[in-house]
Amino acid sequence: MKYYDITRELLSSPVYPGDREPELEKVFDMRKGADFNLCSLSCSLHAGTHCDAFLHFCRDGQDIASMPLDHFIGPCLLLSVPGHSLVTEDDLRDRIPEGTRRLLLKSGGTSFLAPSGAAFLLRRGILTLGTDASSVAPPEDEAGIHIPLLSGGVALIESLWLDEVPDGEYFLSAAPIKIRGAEGAPCRAVLFSPDADTPETS
C-alpha cells in the first residue's frame, strides 16, 4: 500500500504570527529516575497541520468534535497552483473534475486563496479545502476568506506538507483530534495512492 504522510511535525512547524510556540514538557523522565516517561503538551489548536471547524469564524458553528468525519476522510484531488500569489477562479477553473468534494492546494506553502477562488469553490460544492500554507487566507484578509468558506459548509485543513506528493487523485485520511467546544484541532494527515486498498466512500 503506497501512502504519503502529509503532516508537519508539530514542534518544528512554523508558528502563525501571534500564536504561542508549542511546548512539550517532560513531567516524568526515565532518564532522571522515573519509572516511565510522561509528557504534557501546550500549544495553539492551530499549530502544525490542523483542521478548522465551522466554529473558528462562525459564532454558532459546529465545534471540531461535532464535525462530520466525511470532511476529513475520503477521495480527494491534489492540485498545484502558482506560488507566491492569490489563487483566483482563473487558476482553478477547468482543472477540477465534476464531483470533486475534497481539494488540496499545493504551492510550496506560499499562496493563499483570493475571494474569487473561494467563491468558485463554494459554487462547485467543495466539502473540504486543504492547503500547504499556514492558512487558506492571506494575513491581511483572514476573515474575508474564512467566513464565506466556513459558513458555506467548507471545512479546512491547513499547514499540510505536500512538497513530495505528485498532483493527482488520492484517498485522504485527516481526522482531527476530538475536542468538545474547540474551533480546531491537530490532525495526522495521510494520502493513499489510487492503487491503495482503501474503502470506497463519497
Image (spheres, rainbow, N blue to C red):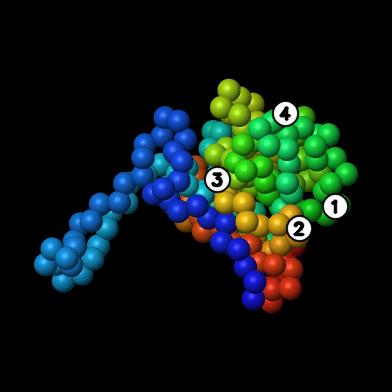
Task: Please report the residue visible at 66 percent of the width from the left and 32 percent of the height from the top.
Answer: 84
| Side of 202 where 14 appears, left or right | left
What residue does disc 4 label?
A: 115
Q: Earlier in the sequence, mark 1 or mark 3?
A: 1
Vertical relation: 185 (above or below) 146: below
Task: Please report the residue visible at 39 percent of the width from the left and 49 percent of the height from the top.
Answer: 11
Instruction: Name the image quarter holding the N terminus.
Output: bottom right
Q: Kindly state the secondary structure of the residue where label 1 is placed.
A: loop
Task: Please report the residue visible at 63 percent of the width from the left and 56 percent of the height from the top.
Answer: 164
Q: Kindly state the secondary structure of the residue where label 2 is placed.
A: strand
* Residue closest to the far top: 140
What residue does disc 2 label?
A: 168
Residue kind at label 1, given as amino acid type: Pro
Q: Nearer the viewer, mark 4 or mark 3?
A: 3
Q: Earlier in the sequence, mark 4 or mark 3?
A: 4
Q: Mark number for residue 117?
A: none
What residue does disc 3 label?
A: 159
What residue does disc 1 label?
A: 97
Q: Residues within 10 Å of mark 3 (few under 14, many from 20)?
A: many
Q: Position of residue 94 (x, y in %)?
A: 88, 44
Residue kind at label 2, given as amino acid type: Gly
Instruction: Name the image quarter holding the C terminus.
Output: bottom right
Q: Earlier in the sequence, mark 2 or mark 1?
A: 1
Residue kind at label 4, given as amino acid type: Pro
Task: Please report the residue visible at 20 percent of the width from the left and 69 percent of the height from the top.
Answer: 36
The CA span between labels 3 and 2 is 19 Å
Residue kind at label 3, given as amino acid type: Ser
Q: Earlier in the sequence, mark 3 or mark 2?
A: 3
